[in-house]
């Protein structure tokens, strides 16, 4: 895994997530994760924000949404899909 700063993490589901990734790999499926992320130094409308690579969230910052590159990548990946299974919103 990567440092996620102060992002919300459900520790009791980390092993479940690892299992999903392993199963997808065994089945030759892809799980698309964001390449970049909008981060903030607080969960507040007036927080300072930045866009960083998904593996570069600094301590004291939290991931809040997909970055523009990730949004464009997902838009392209989903452009010809007939069925999409998602786990929750892409941001807050």
Image: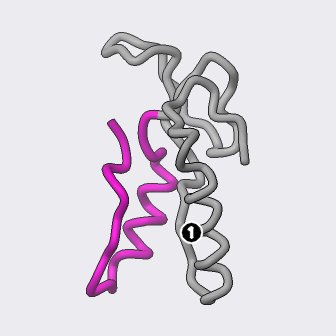
Point 31% across, 75% down: residue? 84
Point 65% across, 43% down: residue? 53
Please, which colouring scheme is shown?
Answer: one colour
Instruction: Specify few, some or many for label 1: CA neighbours under 10 Å numbering under 14, 14-19, or 20 or more.
Output: few
Which percent across, then down, holds residue 12? 55, 43
Image quarter of residue 30: bottom right
> Which is nearer the eye, 5 or 40?
5
Q: Is residue 66 magenta?
A: yes
Point 42% across, 56% down: residue? 71
Residue 18 versus residue 39 in the image, above or below: below
Which percent across, then down, holds residue 80? 33, 85
Element at badge 1? Answer: helix
Q: Which residue is mark 1?
A: 20
Point 33% across, 78% down: residue? 79
Which percent across, then down, holds residue 56? 70, 37
Outermost left residue: 82
Q: Which residues are magenta?
A: 64-92
- Placement of the C terminus among the 4 image quadrants: top left
Outermost front residue: 12
């Amino acid at each position: 895994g990567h440092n996620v700063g102060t992002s919300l993490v459900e520790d009791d589901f980390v092993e479940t997530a690892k299992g999903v990734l392993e199963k997808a790999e065994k089945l030759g499926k892809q799980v698309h994760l964001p390449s970049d992320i909008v981060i903030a130094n607080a969960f507040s409308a007036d927080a300072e924000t930045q866009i960083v690579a998904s593996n570069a969230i600094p301590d004291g910052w939290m991931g809040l949404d997909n970055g523009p590159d990730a949004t464009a990548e997902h838009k392209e990946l989903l452009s010809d899909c007939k069925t999409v299974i998602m786990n929750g919103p892409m941001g807050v």
